[in-house]
């Protein structure tokens, strides 16, 4: 079993190569991008039996609204790309874990992920007070 996350164009190239090696006879579990018809077409004829899309629940609530407000301010649209909320969450959780650990070393801050991402979570307003990292860091 292979866990993957690619845009359709990258996946198409990878799967063409993987198919030549016989690797498309292995189950692939992908993120929400894999739910699209173009993704399945790129995978090829074994997609119905070997390609599984893991779909998240539809986001709601004040944290998602905060994300949409920030996204709209930057990109002037309230329609983010399908995988953008996942990336946003990963960056926010990582930043909060680093802040709590007072370190950017993953060996130090990784253990803080569950304290900032598990219920009851953390208030995102804390991020507004973080300073930007110096250029090149």
Image (cartoon, rainbow, N blue to C red):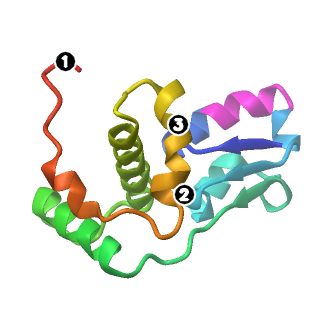
> Helix or strand or loop: what does disc 3 sit on?
helix
Residue 75 is drawn in which quadrant?
bottom left
2 or 3: mark nearer the eye:
3
| Alpha carbons under labels 2 and 3: distance apart | 27 Å
Per the image, the residue denoted by label 2 is 33
Q: Is residue 102 above or below residue 47?
A: above
Q: Residue at x 13, y 39 (%)?
A: 131
- The quadrant in which the N terminus is found is top right
Residue 98 is drawn in which quadrant?
top left
Q: Position of residue 69 (x, y in %)?
A: 18, 70
The single residue placed furthest to the top in the displayed view is 136
Q: Start and end of the magenta stretch?
A: 14-22
Disc ID at residue 110: 3
The single residue placed furthest to the bottom in the displayed view is 61
**54 sits left or right of 24 in the view:** left
Per the image, the residue denoted by label 1 is 136
């Amino acid at each position: 079993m292979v866990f993957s996350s690619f845009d359709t164009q990258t996946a198409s190239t990878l799967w063409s190569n993987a198919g030549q090696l016989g690797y498309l006879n292995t189950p692939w579990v992908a993120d929400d991008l894999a739910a699209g018809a173009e993704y399945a077409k790129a995978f090829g004829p074994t997609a119905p039996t070997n390609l599984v899309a893991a779909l998240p629940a539809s986001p709601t609530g004040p944290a998602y609204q905060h994300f949409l407000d920030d996204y709209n301010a930057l990109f002037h649209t309230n329609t983010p790309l399908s995988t953008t909320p996942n990336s946003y969450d990963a960056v926010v959780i990582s930043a909060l874990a680093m802040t709590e650990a007072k370190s950017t070393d993953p060996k130090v801050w990784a253990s803080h992920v569950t304290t900032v991402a598990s219920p009851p979570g953390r208030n995102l307003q804390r991020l507004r007070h973080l300073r930007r990292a110096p250029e090149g860091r």
